[in-house]
Image: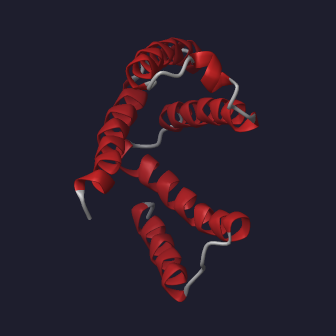
Amino acid sequence: MNLYMMWPIALAVVAEIFYQVCAKSLPGNLNPFASLTITYLVAAAVCAVAFGISRNGSSFLDEFSKMNWTTYVLGFALMCMEAASIYMYKVGWTLNTGYICKAIILSIALIFVGYLLYKESFTWEKAAGIGACLVGLYLINK
């Protein structure tokens, strides 16, 4: 695998580490939605700068005309994911088990979503991987 394939994974891993540490470290008495409001204002500013750098001559209005329902649902889904992660830590999940339990369950669910919606293959190897994940989930929470 080359660098072109790996840089998004590396960025996601580094960003996710910062994300989980920050979500776990929010003050306990802080309303998560107040925090998310500031979080999304910062994210919007960073996105605006990144768009300005990467736009290749297109305007925001040009790009806006290309959007469909997925952009709006993605925004709602992101907010739900953020709130769920913050609440996951507020209710007592630890940093070293909460995320991995969520990731295992999500990964298993996405195998079925990929199969049902996108006709991705479902193989015996994937079934074995699901079994291994479930065993790991059991062991982590034992």
Farthest residue, direction left: 3
Measured from the top left, where is residue 11 in percent x and y? 31, 41
Q: Is residue 8 above or below residue 45?
A: below
Q: Residue at x 68, y 72 (%)?
A: 119
The quadrant in which the C terminus is found is bottom left
Quadrant of the image containing the N terminus: bottom left
Residue closer to the observer: 71 or 29: 71
Asked if residue 28 can be seen in this view, the reply is no
Give residue 139's position: percent from left, percent from top: 41, 68
Q: Quarter-wise, where is residue 33 in the image? A: top right
Q: Is residue 101 above or below residue 81?
A: below
Q: Position of residue 42 (x, y in %)?
A: 45, 14
Q: Mark yes or no: residue 21 visible.
A: yes
Residue furthest to the right in view is 69
Residue 53, percent across and down?
37, 20
At 74% from the left and 34% from the top, the residue drawn is 68
Left-right relation of 105 to 57: right
Indicate whether 132 appears above or below 71: below
The residue lying toward the viewer, choosing from 7 and 135, is 7
Q: Residue furthest bottom?
A: 124
The extreme front residue here reads 57
Question: What color scheme is it?
Answer: secondary structure
- Which image quadrant is residue 80 in? top right
